[in-house]
Image: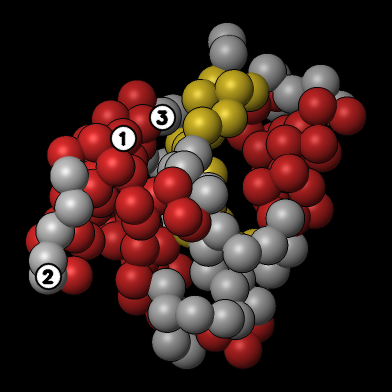
Amino acid sequence: MLWTVYLAGEIHSDWRNEIIDGAKRIELPIEFTGPVTDHDASDNMGTRIFGDEEKKFWKDQKGARLNAARTKTLIENADLVVVKFGDEYRQWNAAFDAGYASAMGKPLIVMHPADLTHALKEIDAAANAVAENTDQVVRALKYITTHP
């Protein structure tokens, strides 16, 4: 079986490539999907397609709605969702994606540093696994996707 894994969460580090490379190295039967990770493209695509807005609220709405169409579809089509929370920036998108995946009944692996455990306790409680690094995620994916 070919699994589809959606990689949600922060876009400011190389964690997605670490997981993808690790999965390729051990030949896991996984196709990876994820959000648009080009911050400028993600934030500005709505106005690039539908025209500029005077108010930032409406600019953000145009981009957010396009991104939501992509995210919703890819999470719904995923067999499993990995959500990474980082130390920098607010992680509202990651929290929303984790909640959406959980509400859809998708298996969920959450990854974050140990010092975020208290802040993310409700999200961790909804997850099937909580990892602290990409190696743990790859090892979990190996078990889930290839164990007889």
Front one among 27 and 41: 41
Write the residue at 68% across / 62% down. 13
State the separation of the CA atoms marked 1 and 3: 12 Å
Task: Tell me where residue 135 appears, x and y as whole percent.
Answer: 80, 53
Which residue corresponds to mark 2? Answer: 55
Horizontally, residue 14 falls left or right of residue 121, namely: right
Horizontally, residue 54 falls left or right of residue 125, namely: left
Say whether disc 1 or disc 3 marks the residue closer to the N-terminus: 1
Write the residue at 81% across / 36% down. 21
| Label 2 secondary element | loop
Which residue corresponds to mark 3? Answer: 78
* Mark linked to residue 122: none
Query: Which quarter of the rendered picture does the N terminus lie within?
Result: top right
Horizontally, residue 77 falls left or right of residue 143, namely: left
| Label 3 secondary element | loop
Q: Coloring scheme of the render? A: secondary structure
Task: Tell me where residue 133 appears, x and y as whole percent.
Answer: 73, 63
Say whether disc 1 or disc 2 marks the residue closer to the N-terminus: 2
| Amino acid type for the residue under numbered disc 3 | Ala
| Amino acid type for the residue under numbered disc 1 | Arg
Which residue corresponds to mark 1? Answer: 70
State the separation of the CA atoms marked 3 and 2: 35 Å
Task: Tell me where residue 3 appears, x and y as whole percent.
Answer: 55, 21
Vertically, is 109 above or below 54? above
**Residue 83 visible in image:** no
| Amino acid type for the residue under numbered disc 2 | Lys
